[in-house]
Image (cartoon, coloured by chain):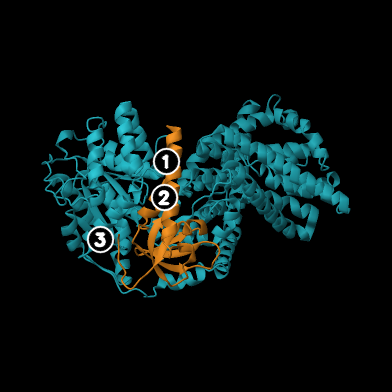
Amino acid sequence: MRNHDEAARSVPSVLGACCADGSGPTQPVGPCTIRVALVGQPNVGKSTVFNLLTGLNQHVGNWPGKTVERKEGIHRCDGVDIQIVDLPGTYSLTANSLEERITRDYIIHERPDVVVMVADAASLERNLYLLSEILCLPAPVVLALNMVDVAQQQGLGVEPHVLEAALGLPVVPMVASKNQGVRELVDTVLRVYREGPRGVCRPDIREDHREVLAELVNLIAGSVPEPYPEDWVALKMLEGDDEITEMMRARLTPEQWEQVHRVLMKHEDAILAIAGGRYEWVRRMTRAALTVPKAGQITLTDRIDKVTTHPVWGLFVLLGVLGAIFWLTYTIGSPIQAFLDRYLIQAGAEWVRTALAGAPWWISGLLADGVIGGAGMVLTFLPILVIFFAVLGALEDIGYMARAAYVMDRFMHLMGLHGKSFLPLFLGFGCNVPAVMGARIVDSPKARLLTILVAPLVPCTARMAVVAVLAPIFFGAAAIWVSWGLIALSLAVLAVVGIALHELVLGGEHVAFIMELPLYHKPNARTIGLSVWQRTMGFVRKAGTIILIVSVVVWALSVLPHGEVDTSILAAVGRFLSPLGALMGVGWQMMVALLTSFVAKENTIATLSVLLGVGGEGAGLAQVLPTLLTPASALAFLVVQVLFIPCAATVATMRQETGSWKWTAFSVALLFILSFAVGIGVYQLALLTGWGV
Amino acid sequence: MHAKKHFHLWEHFRRRERKAATDGRAVTLGALPAGKTATVAELQGGRGFTTRMAALGFTPGAQVTMIQNFGRGPVIVMVRGTRIALGRGEAEHVWISANGGEAHEES
C-alpha cells in the first residue's frame, strides 16, 4: 500500500463557495496498488460494473460483524493493481440503514484513493442526490454514467461533457451491460489518481440554513475527532443523524452540548430544507446537461407494468412464473438431485464403509453418515438451488422481482411484512438456508428477523422428498393431493405464525414499504452467471464449514454411546418423547426418525429403514410401515415432519444471520411445539370424524 | 432532559396541526387518482421516514405523478423520473397540493 501524505489531502468544505478551486496535491507515480470504492444507488448496474472490472477475481464476504455482503476484487491494468471494493447500494448517506453507515464509514475511515460513483443516466436527478452527499466527504470522485442507452430509449438527452463541466469532476458515459466504457473508466480512475482532484463543484446548504450551520460549526470546532470533516459533522447533526449526534454529544462538554442541543431543537425541520437544497443543486448541475422529454410518453415499462403490477393480472403473472420455476425444479432439478443422492452420496458412503471396514466403527460412521450423509447430502441439492438462483437472478436482472414484491405486498402486509420479504421466502421452497440468508434484502431489522423466523415454515424440497416417499405408501393415488395439502397447510401455518409474531416481534409496528421499481431491461448473461456463481459458492462454503460441524455433532448424538441408533442419546430422547407420539398414534421409532431429520431431512427415511430393520430404500418400508401406522397416524406424522424444526444447516444459518442464540432457540422451540400441536390436532380430528383409523 | 423532549414533541405536533388546518386544500398522496400530477407539500412522519423519502426525491415542491392507485393496497408513483412503490400508509403520510397553473419546482 502506498504511503500517502495524509495531510496533503484537501478536506472539502460544504460551506465553501461553489466551484472553489481545489487543486489537488501531486501524487507519486509508480507501480502500485490503488484502492477504489464503488458507490451507487440500487438498480444502477453497479454490480455489473464491478463484475466487468474484476471478473472471477473477486472475494465475497461479510463486513466485519455485520450481515451485509462485502465484495472485493482486483483489476490489473498497465502494471497497476486496482483494488476495488463494491460498497452496498444506498440512496443517501444518512445513518438510516446498515448499508448507508458502511458506505460512509468506509469512505471516511478507509480513505479510498478514488471513489467511483455509478449513476443511472435514466434517472440522473435522483442519482446525483447521492453524489451531492459523497462530494461532502474527503475523496476524489469519478462519475460513471451508466445505462446511457436506456436514457436514450427513454427520450432523455444526457450530455456527459456538459455535466462534467458543471460538476467539475470526470464523467464517463457507459453501457456496462454491453461492456462499453469500461476501459475509459479505468483510464479516468488512473488519471484522477495521478493528477489528484480538480476544482469540484460542491453542493451548498440552502441560504435559509447557512447561518445556523455556521453557528453549529463554530460550536463544535475543535471537538470533532479525526478523520471527520467538521462541516460534514455539523451538517449531519442538523439533519438529525443519530450516530453523529451521539458521537459529538460524548465529546462535547455538558455546557457546549446544551448550546448545540438548543440550536438543533430550534431547527428540527432542517431535514427537508437540506434535502431540498441538494435537489436544487442537482437541478443547477443538470440544467444544461439534461433534456427531459415531454411528460405523458408511454414507455415499454409502463405497458408491461399495466399487467405485472395489476392486483389481479399481476397475481396471475406471478403464479405463472412460480409455476414455471417449480416445473423446472421438478423436471430437471429433482432427477439430478436423486441421481447425485444415489450415485454420489449413497455410493460414496458405501465405498467409505467398505474401504474403512478394518477401522474402528466410529471412523467409518463419522465419514459415511456424519460428513457424507449430512453435509454431503446438503450438497446434492445444489442443482435445484442453481435453478432457483438462475431463474431468480434473471428475474431480478430484468426488473421483475420488484414487481413480484409489489404484487405480494397486499398479502405480506397481513403479517406486518412487506412485499420484499416474499422473495427470500420463495427461495425457501428450494432450500431454507438461502431463504434465511436472502432475508438480508429486507431493510428493517425487525421485519428481517420476522422473515427469518417464518422462513423454516416454507416446505423445502428435502421435506417434500420425504413426503414423496412416504405418502404413496399410505395414500396411493391420493398421495399427490396429500402433498399439495401439506404445502397449503405449511403456508397457512406460516401466515398465522407471521401474524402472531408480528404482534410479538414487531409489537404490531408498521413496516414502511418504499421501493423503487426499476425500468425493465434485457437480462445480462454475465451478471446472472456471476450472481448464480457467488450464491452457489456461498452455499457450498457454508456446507463445508458450519453445516459440516453441526452435521457431525448431530450424527454423534445419533450413535453415541454404543454405536447404534436405537441405543443412542437421540433414541433416548425419542423414547422420552414417545408419550407425545402416542397422542397421534406413532411409536418411538417414528419419533427417533423425526429427530434424526435434524441432520438432514431425508434421514427420516434412512433412520426408519434402520430402526425397522428393513434395510435399503423405500421398498421394505412399503410392507412394514402400514402394519405400524394407521393412515390417520401417517398423515399426522407427515404434518409434523413438514412443520418440524428445520435441518441443522438452516438452524446454524439462522444463528449466523440473526446473531442471536435467543431467537434461534425461540424458533426451534416454537417449531417443535407447533409441529406437534398441529400433528396431534390433525390426528384427533381424524379420530373424531372416524377417517383413516 | 426527558421532560424537555416531550414538551418539544408536543410542540412539534401542535405546529403540524396548525399547518394542516391552515392549508385548506391539502390532501395526501393516497388520494391522488392515477394519471394526475401534484406537488409535494410536506412529509409527515418520523425522521427515518422523512430522510428516506427525501433522498428518493419527495421534497416539498417536487412533482409527483400517480401511476397506479386502486384506492386500497400499495400505490406506484413517478417522482423525479423514477417509479416508486409506496405502501398505502406511506402514501398517506405525504401531503400534496393540487397543481395550479404554473408547475413550480422546489420551494
The chain letter corresponding to cyan is: A
> Helix, strand, or loop for circle 2?
helix
> A380 or B66: nearer the eye?
B66
Q: Is residue A219 visible?
A: yes
| Percent coordinates x, y for residue A450 in the rendering | 57, 45
Amino acid type of the residue tagged 1 in the rendering: His
Q: Is residue A534 visible?
A: no
Judge left or right: residue A280 versus residue A367: left
Mark 3 burial class by Cα count in 10 Å: few <14, some 14-19, many 20+: some
Q: Amino acid at mark 2?
A: Arg
Q: For mark 2, what is the residue?
A: B15
Position above or below: A591 against A75: above
Query: Are callouts 1 and 3 both on one chain?
Result: no
Q: Earlier in the sequence, mark 2 or mark 1?
A: 1
Between the residue at mark 1 and the residue at mark 3, the CA separation in whole angstroms equals 34 Å
Where is residue A215, by image quadrant?
Answer: top left
Q: Residue at x 79, y 49 (%)?
A: A682
Left or right placement of residue A183 versus residue A430 in this view: left
Residue kind at label 3, given as amino acid type:
Arg
Quadrant in which the N terminus of chain A is drawn: top left
Query: In the structure shown, which secondary structural element does the residue marked by tag 1 occupy?
Result: helix
Residue located beneath label 3 in the image: A283
Q: Chain of mark 1?
A: B
Residue under circle 1?
B8
The residues bearing labels 3 and 2 have C-alpha atoms spaced at a distance of: 30 Å
Tell me the residue at 52%/38% (across/down).
Answer: A658
Shade of chain B as shown in the rendered figure: orange
Examine the rendered structure and indicate whether residue A459 appears above or below residue A107: below
Q: Position of residue A551 (x, y in %)?
A: 59, 35
